[in-house]
Image (cartoon, coloured by chain):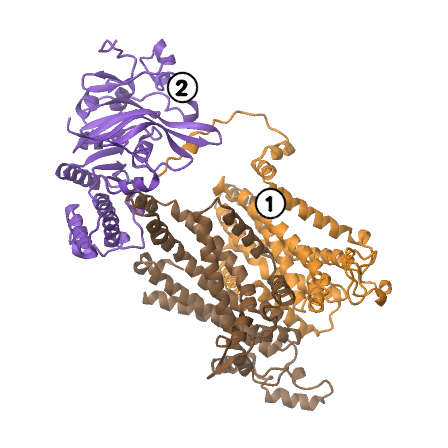
Chain colours: A purple, B orange, C brown
């Protein structure tokens, strides 16, 4: 693998609420290399967005990072003072959110917002920054950028706005971009365009991307590797082809089986019975065991550690140290 | 984009048997909220105290300040009891007529509360009535009522109250007896504050009107007023109650202001506002107690009611649950 | 845009017409205008003469037309108390009221916005809680009580500021101003605070609530993700978005302030239109009362219109879809 841009080890994020401390993420480990797109997939509430927020340091009270470490390159960034973290945000890590409609300040022109980001992180003059902003808009595929740079966000369509958001995230040339559901709020046709754009930019700039989504289609299309999350833990993480075509973790198997395909002749989609447990009621042992078709004694008591099987890391007792499925 | 962890952590409801109304109330969020809020409890206690004092005024006042026979000029301009020149039984001092300030404040509190509450009742009836009509019948009636409401909203209540007052005086002559004056003030206040009720009730009615149970009632042949009062009205009680509480404070302030301006209750039967007006004259000669105590009573009353209204509004607000 | 303007002007005209009708009704039917001009023992024949000369026997519609015509020419009739044209009386006193209203609004805006922003950004501090307590008091205390309290504190006890009147004023053309003399400025302080306190608390609460809302938006979160400085986020983006609705509401308040001056002017014996109105109510001077009503309506309507137009200038989203606002 190429040089590692992001390395997350055993990350834990906890929220203090009236009902006690809730652990949103419990022991998540992943890494992303240069120019690589890691998909992070899972149901709502599995902890995907929290992972992204933790990496960029935007976990707000009552939440906090309760354990583990996050490294950008070789430096640790999870314990930095706020001002140092601020300088990393935007400059070395960029983030784009789900809804382009609400991501942009409606009272400022698009160009002003890009220039502001550029000049916060570099010493460029206003003129140079503006020229660079026009370049960025061209890169993300906005037609007539010299004119549209002075437009207000509401004057752009949804897809165009998301491109502007990507331009903003790229403005200071970060090494890593966290894309939190970047296509969920867009039309299907526009989705494809945005994904293609992301992939191209990633190849051309060598930016690492953490692509958080619940849409397996997007993952299959764009990601190099994928991490499947469940109940704040990673069930399986590995190359996309392996995880999608031959999933090992029972939950991942269930997920892939639930995706409708045109070639499928089955009458009904397979469904995983039950639902993901609430944060206040995470089962002991393996979090998935109450719903697992392959559950056995050990699953109920002991939490599985990730084990390398082939090219994938799986957290399931079915694959103990001896290797293949029991 | 922040993960809403709290929502994910709700415990499922446990089934329970149907309890009595009192038990339901004591278990309700409203009561729990109240018990936890020291401010709300304090405000409620003060309000209750004020109401109690006002109600009991005729019995607990050392003196009846309206009765000229009980006044002696000899006792005039006495400072409060803790001042070396003070005299018993005048706990809070006397004014230039020998009137006991404590008694005057108690009676004034009584008047202020009575007028305020009557004002709320009038504006409530007017507002709810007009709101029901506008919302239920819609059409031209609705438009007219709402336009009038809009026009009226551009003017502050005190201006409307003053105008009504002035016009009444012009039409009926300035020789109005005290009861008529009270009626006039109550009507002025009522006319100034109905809009809030009307708007709230109207929107609720418009929501309810299209619901099935109203259509069903119509089919059975129930007349419109019956439907409105019996079915629609109970659904509006929550917000109306909040409006009424805040309105009470405003009504009391409006009456006090009218009296202070000389167009409210007269000096022969003074409310707290009138007392402040008369006492203001003595501020510079150093006799502060004639103004201070009515002022404190008024301020305390309004503050308590406002706090209660604020708390009630937040407690009943579905968005904040 | 033009359609919007015409519609608002039409609305304004309707409001003024309605108020004009009420003012006329008061003018003509409240009490007997003849009684106000002559004593009770004037013979009936003379009264009939006077009635005829005043045009009181003509059809009502004609009288209304005459009234409206007069009003549009600036003729509001003769005051019963002072035997002078109402217009002259009002014009004499308008500078006093307007200067007071201006200072009060200035006070309310500056202090209110400052306190509101502070309370939003430093929510848990003692000072913020203190400000909130003050705001509750400001809303609860009747204006006249505040005035009396201030007089007692600063005039009677400390002797720093005057308790009544405008001090020395300077006449410039048709305007008398208190801004150019020390005593004039001193005299403005207590009444301005009294008049502006209620508005100040309103603005403070509004700014605080708005700012807290704004700080929770996606675009603020995105701004943080881009590593913008706290200063840029709070005062560039958050504040600007907060102030947009606030400015318009404050503008609307200006009208209230002019009307509320009635009370403040009475407490401080400030020779403005408000005091004139109160005296008119006390002495049943109908012409002044109806004129004041019309004037206040006109001021309100004008301010509303200006504020609506201002809104479209300030918020770029409204420039293209102006028809939305009602």
User: Do the residues bearing badges 1 and 2 touch, measured as CB atoms within 8 Å?
Assistant: no
- The residue tagged with tag 1: helix, strand or loop? helix
Discs 1 and 2 carry the same chain letter: no
- Residue A4 has which mark? none
User: Which of these two is toward me, A259 or B32?
Assistant: B32
Residue A94 or C18: which is nearer the viewer?
A94
**Mark 1 — residue?**
B230
Mark 1 is surrounded, within 10 Å at the Cα level, by few (under 14), some (14 to 19) or many (20 or more) other residues, namely few
Q: Quadrant of the N terminus of chain C?
A: bottom left
Q: Nearer the viewer, mark 1 or mark 2?
A: 2
Residue found 50% across the figure and 69% down from its top: C101
**Residue designated by label 2:** A283
Total numbered circles: 2
Q: Position of residue A39 (x, y in %)?
A: 23, 30
**Residue A152 appears in the figure:** yes
- The subunit letter for the residue under badge 2 reads A
Residue nearest the viewer, comparing C232 with B311 = C232
Q: Position of residue C5 (x, y in %)?
A: 36, 67
Relative to A41, does residue B98 appear above or below in the rendering? below
Real-space Cα separation, disc 1 to disc 2, in angstroms = 51 Å
Q: Secondary structure at mark 2?
A: loop
Among all residues in the image, which is located at the extreme left?
Answer: A204
């Amino acid at each position: 693998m190429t040089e590692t841009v992001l390395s997350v080890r055993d990350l834990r994020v906890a929220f203090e609420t009236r009902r006690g401390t809730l652990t949103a993420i419990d022991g998540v480990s992943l890494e992303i290399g240069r120019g690589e797109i890691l998909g992070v997939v899972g149901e709502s509430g599995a902890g995907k967005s929290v992972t992204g927020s933790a990496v960029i340091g935007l976990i707000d009270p009552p939440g906090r990072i309760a354990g583990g470490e996050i490294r950008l390159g070789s430096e640790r960034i999870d314990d930095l003072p706020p001002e140092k973290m601020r300088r990393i945000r935007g400059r070395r890590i960029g983030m784009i959110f789900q809804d382009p409609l609400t991501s942009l300040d409606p009272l400022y022109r698009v160009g002003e917002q890009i220039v502001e980001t550029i000049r916060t992180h570099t010493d460029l003059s206003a003129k140079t920054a503006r020229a660079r902003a026009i370049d960025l808009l061209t890169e993300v595929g906005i037609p007539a950028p010299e004119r549209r740079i002075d437009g207000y966000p509401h004057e752009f369509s949804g897809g165009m706005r998301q491109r502007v958001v990507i331009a903003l995230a790229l403005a200071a040339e970060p090494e890593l971009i966290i894309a939190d559901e970047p296509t969920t709020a867009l039309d299907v046709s526009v989705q494809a365009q945005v994904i293609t754009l992301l992939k191209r930019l990633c190849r051309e700039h060598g930016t690492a991307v953490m692509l958080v989504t619940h849409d397996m289609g997007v993952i299959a299309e764009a990601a190099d590797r994928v991490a499947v999350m469940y109940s704040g833990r990673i069930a399986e993480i590995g190359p996309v082809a392996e995880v999608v075509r031959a999933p090992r973790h029972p939950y991942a198997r269930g997920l892939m089986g639930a995706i409708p395909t045109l070639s499928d002749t089955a009458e009904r989609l397979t469904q995983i019975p039950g639902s993901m447990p609430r944060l206040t009621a995470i089962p002991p042992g393996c979090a998935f065991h109450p719903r697992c078709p392959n559950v056995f004694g050990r699953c109920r008591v002991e939490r599985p550690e990730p084990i390398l099987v082939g090219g994938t890391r799986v957290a399931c007792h079915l694959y103990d140290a001896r290797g293949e499925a029991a | 984009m922040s993960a809403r962890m709290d929502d994910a952590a709700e415990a499922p409801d446990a089934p329970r048997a149907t309890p009595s109304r009192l038990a339901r109330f004591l278990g309700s969020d409203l009561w729990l909220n109240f018990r936890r809020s020291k401010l709300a409890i304090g405000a409620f206690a003060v309000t209750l105290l004020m109401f109690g004092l006002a109600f009991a005024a005729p019995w607990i006042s050392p003196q009846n300040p309206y009765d000229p026979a009980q006044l002696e000029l000899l006792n005039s301009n006495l400072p409060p009891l803790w001042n070396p020149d003070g005299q018993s039984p005048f706990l809070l001092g006397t004014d230039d007529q020998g009137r006991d300030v404590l008694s005057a404040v108690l009676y004034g509190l009584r008047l202020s509360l009575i007028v305020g509450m009557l004002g709320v009742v009038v504006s409530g009836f007017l507002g709810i009535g007009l709101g029901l009509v506008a919302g239920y019948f819609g059409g031209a009636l609705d438009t007219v009522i709402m336009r009038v409401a809009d026009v009226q909203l551009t003017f502050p209540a005190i201006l409307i109250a003053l105008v009504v007052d002035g016009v009444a005086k012009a039409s009926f002559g300035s020789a109005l007896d005290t009861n008529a004056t009270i009626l006039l003030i109550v009507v002025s206040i009522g006319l100034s504050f109905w809009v809030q009720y009307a708007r709230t009730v109207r929107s609720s009615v418009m929501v309810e009107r299209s619901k099935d149970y109203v259509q069903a009632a119509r089919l059975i042949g129930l007349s419109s007023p019956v439907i409105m009062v019996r079915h629609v009205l109970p659904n509006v009680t929550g917000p109306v109650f909040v409006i009424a509480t805040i309105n009470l404070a405003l009504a009391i302030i409006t009456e006090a202001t009218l009296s202070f301006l000389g167009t409210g209750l007269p000096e022969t039967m003074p409310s707290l506002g009138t007392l402040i007006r008369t006492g203001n004259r003595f501020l510079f000669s150093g006799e502060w107690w004639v103004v201070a105590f009515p002022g404190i009573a008024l301020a305390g009353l309004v503050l308590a009611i406002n706090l209660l209204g604020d708390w009630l509004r937040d407690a009943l607000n579905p968005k904040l649950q | 845009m033009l359609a919007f303007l015409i519609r608002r002007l039409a609305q304004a005209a309707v409001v003024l017409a309605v108020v004009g009708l009420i003012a006329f009704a008061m003018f003509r039917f409240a009490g007997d205008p003849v009684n106000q001009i002559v004593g009770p023992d004037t013979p009936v024949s003379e009264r009939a003469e006077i009635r005829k000369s005043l045009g009181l026997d003509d059809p009502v519609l004609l009288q209304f037309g005459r009234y409206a015509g007069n009003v549009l020419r600036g003729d509001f009739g003769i005051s019963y108390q002072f035997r002078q044209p109402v217009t002259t009386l009002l014009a004499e006193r308008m500078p006093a009221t307007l200067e007071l209203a201006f200072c009060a609004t200035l006070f309310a805006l500056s202090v209110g916005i400052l306190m509101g922003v502070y309370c939003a950004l430093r929510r848990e501090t003692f000072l913020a809680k203190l400000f909130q307590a003050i705001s509750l008091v400001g809303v609860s205390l009747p204006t006249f009580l505040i005035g009396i309290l201030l007089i007692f504190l600063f005039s009677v006890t400390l002797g720093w500021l005057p308790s009544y009147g405008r001090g020395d004023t300077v006449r410039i053309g048709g305007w008398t101003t208190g801004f150019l003399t020390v005593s004039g400025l001193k005299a403005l302080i207590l009444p301005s605070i009294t008049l502006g306190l209620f508005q100040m608390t309103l603005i403070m609460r509004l700014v605080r609530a708005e700012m807290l809302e704004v700080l929770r938006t996606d675009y603020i979160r995105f701004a943080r993700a881009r590593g913008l400085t706290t200063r840029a986020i709070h005062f560039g983006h958050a504040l600007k978005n907060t102030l947009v609705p606030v400015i318009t509401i404050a503008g609307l308040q200006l009208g209230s302030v002019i009307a509320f001056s009635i009370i403040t002017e009475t407490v401080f014996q400030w020779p403005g239109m408000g005091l004139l109105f109160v005296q008119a109510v006390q002495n049943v001077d109908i012409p002044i009362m109806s004129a004041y009503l019309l004037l206040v309506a006109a001021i309100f309507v004008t301010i509303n219109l200006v504020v609506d137009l201002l809104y479209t200038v300030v918020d770029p989203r409204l420039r293209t879809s102006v028809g939305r606002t009602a």
